[in-house]
Image (cartoon, grey):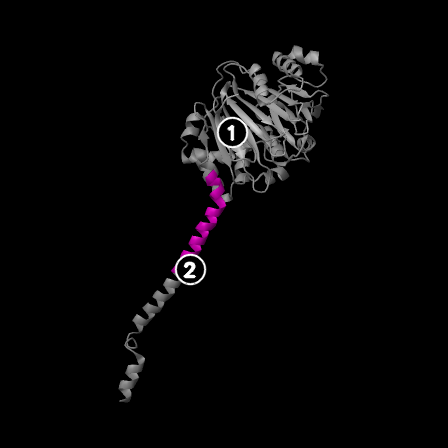
Amino acid sequence: MTDSLVNSNNGPDAAHPTLVRRRRWLRAFTHVALALTVLLLLGVLLLAMLVKDHVRSLWSIRQVPGTKMFVMDYYGSYNLEEIRKHGIDVGDPVGSLVRVTLPGFLVRFIADHTRDKLPPPKEPIRRAVHSCSTVAFRNREGEVLLGRNFDWMHDAFVVLRIHSKKGTSSVAVLDPHYLGLDAKRLAEPSLEERFRLLFLPYLVMDGMNEHGVAIGEMALSDSRAPFDPEKPSVINPLIIRLILDNAQNTEEALDIMRNYNIHFPAVPCHYLIADAKGHSVAVEFIDGRVETISTDETWQVSTNHRLLGKTEADNDRACDRYKKASDQVAKLDGRINMAEMLKVMASVSVEDWTMWTSVYNLSTGEFQVAYRRNFTNLFAGQLGHRSEAFGVSR
């Protein structure tokens, strides 16, 4: 009786210790597997939260019908704060920007997948004559506009809108050729080509921010910027990005310019900056000095010759586009709007050479962009507004 009671209390597994160990191991494995699954799901969720804005940005690119103009909305961070504090290695700008923008585990990936894949620059279809034009104007209503022609040998371009959660929103226009992207690649990008779009914010050539600060750069062959080893260094498109992301007026934009060594890896430039209060200034780099040129007029024009120390007669003789634009805005006598500014910029555009024309209203945040002198098929929008329009007629 006693033996049977003992056997009954021990249960059927008492004689099978191996089976007991297996069941215990199975329960432990199940708990570990469940914990690992939860951690994996949390990791995937965290990764998705970290990259969702970048994914949203990369898949936002679209083409304006009938043009080789593309529009992209950028929602993620591009770590400009690191560049603002420390600059970049101007001897290796691409590698430096990759290291600044991406987490370490992606740096190797982008290096492996982009090495030797960027196509060599195309030969010019004619002698490379720089002919960009920028015009700032304050009208009778107090609105300030900036018009800009970008003239160069490439074709496709991107209108990039920065939707910042913490910083400053902006719109800018840029040439994606320097990322090895043309119209065909932008229209149907591979995953690797789409990945390059993360670097578009660094390629700004003109733009406007939500505070009403606008800037355009123009080639100037005899520019020579100062160098101070105590200051961080950047390439010229990055100084525009730093201004658009940080400046609330022209004076702040000038302070930003003075705080960096500006390197021109391709073509030396000068700049025209304006703000919503109507303060415009041209910035030139003469013999290692930062020089500014202001005006008492309600307008200011800059093309591709040195303005410092020149009279209006000197400027008129130096460039026919300068003379044509300045004559027109002077005659308008304060009566100008977006449509009139487009007409002014159209008059100084160059056939087969003007890639885009952009017009910014610094007071309202409105902007319009035309592809290759097609002023009846514009892309238009307004900072801070979700609405946009294609095919807007002037």
Residue at point 71%, 24% (across, down): 291
**Which circle's residue, 2 or 1, is located before the other in the chain?**
2
Hey, which quadrant is residue 23 in on the image?
bottom left
Tell which of 48 and 4 is nearer to you.
Answer: 48
**Left or right: 14 in relation to 274:** left
Can you tell which mark lies on residue 253? none
Q: Which residues are magenta?
A: 33-56
Three-letter code for the amino acid on which mark 1 is drawn: Val
- The image quadrant where one finds the N terminus is bottom left
- Against 392, residue 47 (above or below) is below
Hey, which quadrant is residue 343 in on the image?
top right
Where residue 62 sits in the image (x, y, percent)?
45, 31
Is any atom of residue 9 visible in this view?
yes
Label 1: state its secondary structure. Answer: strand
Residue at point 44%, 33% (across, down): 193
User: Is-magenta flag for residue 330?
Assistant: no
- Against 66, residue 43 (above or below) is below
The residue indicated by pointer 1 is 159
- Does the magenta stretch mainly form a helix, a strand or a loop? helix
Tell which of 278 and 271 is nearer to you.
Answer: 278
Where residue 182 sits in the image (x, y, percent)?
45, 26
Where residue 140 sits in the image (x, y, percent)?
67, 23
Label 1 packing within 10 angstroms: few (<14), some (14-19), many (20+): many
User: Is-magenta flag for residue 36?
Assistant: yes
The residue indicated by pointer 2 is 35
Label 2: state its secondary structure. Answer: helix
Where residue 63 sits in the image (x, y, percent)?
44, 28
- Against 316, residue 114 (above or below) is below
**Left or right: 164 in relation to 308:** left
